[in-house]
Image (spheres, helix red, strand yellow):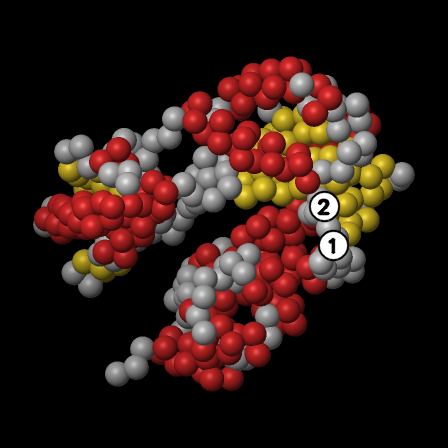
Amino acid sequence: MQHKHDYFIERAEATGRWWEDPWWAQADCEIHFTVPLEAVNRGAAVLSKYFDADWYIGLAKAPRSNLVFPKLCLERSTMALAFIASLGARLETLRHVENLQRPVRVLREAYGDSAFLELEGAESFVQEGFCVSFPKEGSAKSADFIATKDGDTVAVECKRLGDEVWEDWEGSLMSEITRALPWQHEGKEIIVQVALNPRLSEVRFGQEDYAAVNSAISGTIVTAIVAAINNALAQQLPCEGLISDIARFRIDLKQPGIYGGVTGMERSVPAIFRRMFQNGVLRALEQLPKGKAGAIILYSKHAPPAEFFRLLFDAATDADRERFSDLVGVLVCTLQTWFTHTTPTYFENVQTRHTVSSKLVAEVFKRTFPASPG
């Protein structure tokens, strides 16, 4: 017997019109809404203008990794609903922005996470009354967007740091565990929360020659965790368990506001800072125009404590004042999950020559993201 959601997927693949009579509008939709149904419908109406039937059919016939595509119909989840509502609202806010088609094209043709960050940054300035423009298609190397208000102009560069190789292994392991976790017991829905050993990634072999070994290790870890959880289900819920040197877990009946999932492993604070500064701040700085105020929005899945970043950020900008003189500050955003909601942090550059623009940008990020001062 065909699962009902399969019908929506097959219909969307055939017609491309993913927004018509969608799964979330059905009377028997059991997915938890964290946003109003009206907001999802409005978001879908906007997104249908940018991610049309031809685009959807093309991706369905020739699949490739894309941030937007699975959220529109393939994924039946709370996160998909929030994504549709928020991205639709964002594009509606930015509908009059010059050259908006540039980041939209990236969302359509590539994976799109970098363009998603650009749109989020641009929206924050538009909300505060700035006139924002993206560079023209095919233009030379430049900042991601320009924001102007009352004679002050700020160039903004967005950098999204991807995972390192060992983080890819960790991400794959966490996905495998998530897919293998039970979600029902004795006819009742349950939630399972797994916290991996913070140093578990150290078991991975570094060289690509050991891919088979690394795969076997991750498979064994998944099997051990699932077996322990299944054994624990014989106990009265809620219950907790420990798998020595691998993970802790907790099982409970499903309740509103409580979500299952897998949390990951420990990172070295100095290594995180080095990577953020070298691959994020310094490379973004190269994109910003000389002689004009510039700001950086930097996404990193993980970030060091604000005090640590502030200390070394000040040391670097003071040591090479000329290089950093046009930089007004760096907004650091980290991964948001059901379990972790970290406020973005804005680090003003005390060495900047653009003090007025610096205060304007700080106020934008404080009011919109909203960011805390670092």
Front residue (pair 104, 205): 205
> Is residue 225 at all visible to an observer of this figure?
no
Q: Position of residue 85 (x, y in %)?
A: 57, 60
**Circles 1 and 2: CB distance less than 8 Å?**
yes
Front residue (pair 131, 184): 131
Looking at the figure, which quarter contains the C terminus? top right
Front residue (pair 141, 187): 141
Is disc 2 surrounded by few (<14), some (14 to 19) or many (20+) residues within 10 Å?
A: some
Q: Position of residue 263 (x, y in %)?
A: 33, 41
The answer to which image quadrant residue 51 occupies is bottom right
Q: Which residue is drawn at 28% across and 41% down?
A: 207
87 is higher (above) or lower (below) than 231: below
The answer to which image quadrant residue 200 occupies is top left
Residue of label 1: 139
Q: Where is residue 151 in the image (x, y as percent from the top left)?
A: 89, 38
The answer to which image quadrant residue 41 occupies is bottom right
Per the model, the C-alpha gap separating discs 1 and 2 is 8 Å
- Amino acid on which disc 2 is placed: Ser
Residue of label 2: 142
Q: Which residue is drawn at 47% across and 84% down?
A: 14
Looking at the figure, which quarter contains the N terminus? bottom left
203 is higher (above) or lower (below) than 220: above
Q: Position of residue 150 (x, y in %)?
A: 89, 39
Q: Residue at x 45, y 66 (%)?
A: 64
